[in-house]
Image: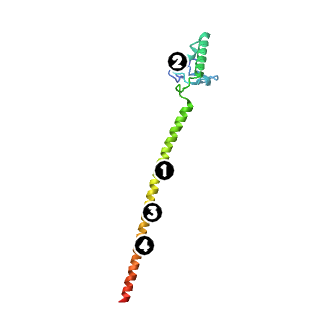
Amino acid sequence: MAVLPEAARVCACPADTCIRATWTPRGEQTHHLPIAFSRDLGDGDARMSYLKNSTFQDRATASLEAKKALLAKMKVKPTVTAEPGTDRATIKANELAELRAKREIERAERRRVQAEQDALKREIEAFNAETAELELRAAQKAARDARYAARKQRRK
C-alpha cells in the first residue's frame, strides 16, 4: 500500500497506518476500502482484531469453542412438567367442570332476568287491559245514561 501525501489524504489517521486511503490500479487515489473490506473498522487499535490470533492452535481453539457454543444452543431444554400426582386429564376435567358451572350460573341468571321481564310485561298488559275495560264501561255507562236522559225527556 502506498503512503499518500498529507494533502491528498482525507482521513485523520496517521499516513503510515491509514488503510482507508488507497490507490486504485489506474493510479487514482480513493478513500474507500475494496468491497470485501467495506465495513467500518472503527478506531486504529480495533482494526482487524480477528487476525490477532495468528497461530493455528489459536484458530483451532476458537473454532472448537464456536462449535461448542452452537451445540449448546441446540441442546434440548428441560420442559415444564406438571406437579406429581395431578393428571392432565383430571386438570382438564376440573377446568371443564368449572366452566360448565359458570355457564350454568350465567344461564340461570339470564332465565331469572327473562322471567322478571316477562312478569313485568304481563303486569303491564293486564293493567292496560283493565284500563281499556274501565274506559269501555265508562263509555257504555255514559251512552246508557244519555239514553235514559233522552227517554225521560220524551216522557215529559
Asked if residue 44 is positioned above or below residue 91 in the image, the reply reads above
Instruction: Indicate the secondary structure of the residue bearing disc 1.
Output: helix
Marks 2 and 4 sit apart, C-alpha to C-alpha, by: 106 Å
Comparing marks 2 and 3, which lies closer to the viewer? 3
The answer to which of 114 and 150 lies nearer the viewer is: 150
Q: Quadrant of the C terminus?
A: bottom left
First in sequence, mark 2 or 4: give its number.
2
Marks 3 and 4 sit apart, C-alpha to C-alpha, by: 16 Å
Tell me whether circle 3 and circle 4 mark residues in contact (CB < 8 Å). Answer: no
Tell me whether circle 1 and circle 4 mark residues in contact (CB < 8 Å). Answer: no
Instruction: Indicate the secondary structure of the residue bearing disc 2.
Output: helix
Can residue 60 be seen by looking at this rendering?
yes
Task: Determine which quarter of the picture holds residue 57.
Answer: top right
- Residue identifier under label 2: 46
The answer to which of 137 and 3 lies nearer the viewer is: 137
Instruction: Indicate the secondary structure of the residue bearing disc 3.
Output: helix
- Residue identifier under label 1: 111
Amino acid beneath label 1:
Arg
Q: Which mark is residue 66?
A: none
- Residue identifier under label 4: 136
Circle 2 packing at 10 Å, graded few (<14), some (14-19), many (20+), is: few
Position in image of residue 43 (x %, y %): 51, 20
- Residue identifier under label 3: 125
Tell me whether circle 2 and circle 3 mark residues in contact (CB < 8 Å). Answer: no
First in sequence, mark 2 or 1: give its number.
2
Amino acid beneath label 3:
Glu
Amino acid beneath label 2:
Ala
Marks 1 and 3 sit apart, C-alpha to C-alpha, by: 21 Å
